[in-house]
């Protein structure tokens, strides 16, 4: 039987079409080929860095600013407290619960439990005044400070958001599977994703403060807001389990930080932060 070039072309197109459909069907059978409708949850730990900030302390008979105050975090290291339900707030932790609204976009609720410790026992520039009654402890710090270099001791002020600097926010993210770039074929066994997100929410710290030798104060209080940008790598194993590393940077503005039991006394500050996070999580459909 004589086969014309037209018939050969038709056979070739038909064969390629069938192979393409078969490959598409196989890909669609993979759990990781689509994401819409999936939930995910994760728990992890972080380290963070903070920019310097001016901290203003206001109250009865005082109003002063510690300029360019520096701060550090308070890491726990690898510890059982990360998975101990009764002690989970002691380390620096990250919680995330999210939902895929489409194959590439997610919406998540996040709680970043950071810790902020102002560095004491340093010389800092102070501007403002302190005029406590002579009968009060702390009156030894009385004076008018006109941008004066002053030694800030622990007797002067202890100022920490250590339980903690709690950033509670919503994040909108995009997720892209980059497995093929690394020649990963079966993504149901292992999948590599990259994610970028934009977040915003409230700052709800438990601030540990001892100011001018007044009684120590350490209670939760809604203090301000934060915004952040995030980029991360997600390593998914066997469809349902993942490890994710994130680099998150943002801005925090707290204009109402409780410092004493007197509701008329407060502190305020704003600063930038950079957070490094590693989390363990799961992804599933209900």
Image (cartoon, rainbow, N blue to C red):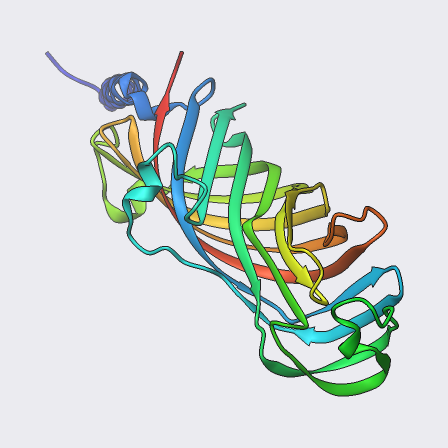
Percent from the top left, x then y, of residue 232? 44, 48
Residue 21 versus residue 259: which sits nearer the camera? 259
Q: Quadrant of the N terminus?
A: top left
**Going by the image, does 164 lie left or right of 253?**
left
Q: Which of the 4 quarters of the picture holds residue 243?
A: top left
Residue found at the very far front of the displayed protein:
135
Q: Compared to 64, does 151 lie above or below?
A: below
Residue 186 versus residue 90: which sits nearer the camera? 90
Q: Which of the 4 quarters of the picture holds residue 151?
A: bottom right
Q: Which of the 4 quarters of the picture holds residue 143?
A: bottom right
- Whether residue 243 is visible, yes or no, is no
Residue at coordinates 37% horizontally, 55% vertically from top-left? 76
Residue at coordinates 76% horizontally, 58% vertically from top-left? 267
Residue 258 versus residue 10: which sits nearer the camera? 258
Residue at coordinates 69% horizontally, 42% vertically from top-left? 221
**Going by the image, does 117 lie left or right of 187?**
right
Q: Compared to 176, does 30 lie above or below?
A: above
**Going by the image, does 164 lie left or right of 201?**
left
Percent from the top left, x then y, of residue 278? 37, 48
Percent from the top left, x then y, of residue 115? 52, 55
């Amino acid at each position: 039987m004589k086969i014309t070039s037209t018939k050969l072309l038709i056979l070739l197109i038909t064969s390629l079409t069938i192979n393409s459909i078969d490959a598409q069907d196989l890909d669609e059978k993979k759990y990781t080929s689509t994401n819409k409708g999936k939930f995910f949850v994760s728990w992890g730990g972080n380290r963070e860095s903070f920019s310097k900030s001016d901290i203003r302390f206001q109250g009865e008979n005082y109003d002063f600013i510690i300029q360019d105050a520096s701060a550090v975090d308070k890491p726990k290291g690898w510890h059982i407290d990360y998975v101990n339900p009764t002690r989970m707030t002691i380390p620096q932790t990250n919680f995330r619960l999210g939902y895929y609204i489409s194959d590439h976009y997610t919406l998540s609720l996040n709680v970043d439990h950071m810790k902020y410790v102002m560095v004491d026992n340093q010389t800092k520039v102070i501007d403002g005044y302190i005029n406590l009654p002579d009968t009060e402890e702390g009156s030894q710090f009385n004076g008018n400070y006109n941008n004066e270099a002053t030694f800030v001791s622990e007797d002067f002020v202890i100022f920490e958001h250590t339980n903690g600097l709690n950033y509670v926010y919503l994040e909108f993210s995009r997720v892209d599977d980059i497995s093929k770039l690394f020649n990963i074929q079966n993504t149901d066994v292992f999948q590599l994703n990259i994610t970028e997100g934009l977040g915003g929410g409230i700052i709800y710290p438990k601030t540990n403060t001892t100011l001018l030798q007044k009684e120590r104060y350490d209670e939760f209080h809604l203090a301000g807001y934060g915004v952040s940008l995030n980029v991360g790598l997600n390593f998914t194993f066997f469809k349902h389990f993942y490890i994710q590393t994130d680099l998150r940077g943002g801005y925090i503005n707290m204009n109402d930080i409780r410092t004493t039991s007197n509701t008329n006394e407060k502190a305020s500050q704003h600063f930038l932060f950079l957070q490094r996070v590693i989390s363990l999580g799961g992804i599933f459909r209900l």
